[in-house]
């Protein structure tokens, strides 16, 4: 017969698994895990049924640093020495988030680039 004072193990939820995978991915990108170890642990995380199993997968790696992120997922430092917004221009294809830039948007981006060059 089981001990009535002992609590049952908690089952893992989908969000528990996702948080664990995020910690593992951070550890992999930080060089704490090899590619093979990362793949193995991510597979084990998605297959885990109990929280204890997830805790064991991350016991020997450090968690990602906690910092404020904006909706874009990019950390932005506000105040002195930081900006309140971020512009990302890649490849010069004139497409942002799946839509083509208007002529006015392209002009604004060119002007922002010129201003930034003058500030240097």
Image: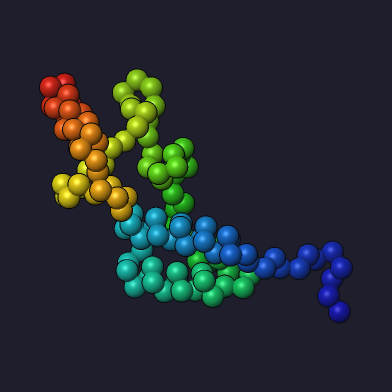
The residue shown at (84%, 71%) is: 3
Relative to 1, say whether 79 is above or below: above
| Residue 90 placement (x, y as % from top left) | 20, 47
Above-or-below relation of 4 to 74 = below
Asked if residue 36 lies left or right of residue 61, the reply is left
Quadrant of the image for the N terminus?
bottom right
Q: Quadrant of the C terminus?
A: top left
Does any portion of residue 74 appear in the rendered image? yes
**Foreground: 86 or 35?**
86
Q: Give left or right: position of 58 versus 86.
A: right
Residue 109 in view, yes or no: no
Residue 25 in picture, x, y percent from top left = 40, 60
User: Residue at point 39% right, 55% down?
Assistant: 26
Q: What residue is shown at x 23% (from left), y 34% (from top)?
A: 104
Q: Residue at x 50, y 66 (%)?
A: 57
Q: Position of residue 18 (x, y in %)?
A: 52, 61
Colour scheme in use: rainbow
- What percent of the width, then of the height, locates residue 100? 25, 48
Q: Is residue 28 left or right of residue 119?
A: right
Residue 81 left/right relative to 94 = right
Look at the picture and state if 7 lies above or below 65: below
Q: Quadrant of residue 114?
A: top left
Task: Give the number of callouts.
Answer: 0
Q: Residue furthest bottom?
A: 1
The foreground one among 56 and 109 is: 109
């Amino acid at each position: 017969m089981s001990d009535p004072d002992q609590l049952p193990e908690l089952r893992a939820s989908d969000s528990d698994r996702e948080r664990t995978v995020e910690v593992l991915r951070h550890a992999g990108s930080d060089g704490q895990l090899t590619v093979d170890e990362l793949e193995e642990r991510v597979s084990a995380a998605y297959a885990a049924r109990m929280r204890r199993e997830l805790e064991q997968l991350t016991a020997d790696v450090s968690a990602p640093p906690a910092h404020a992120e904006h909706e874009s997922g990019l950390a932005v430092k506000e105040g002195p020495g930081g900006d309140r917004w971020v512009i990302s221009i890649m490849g010069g294809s004139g497409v942002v988030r799946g839509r083509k830039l208007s002529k006015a948007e392209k002009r604004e981006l060119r002007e922002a680039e010129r201003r930034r060059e003058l500030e240097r």
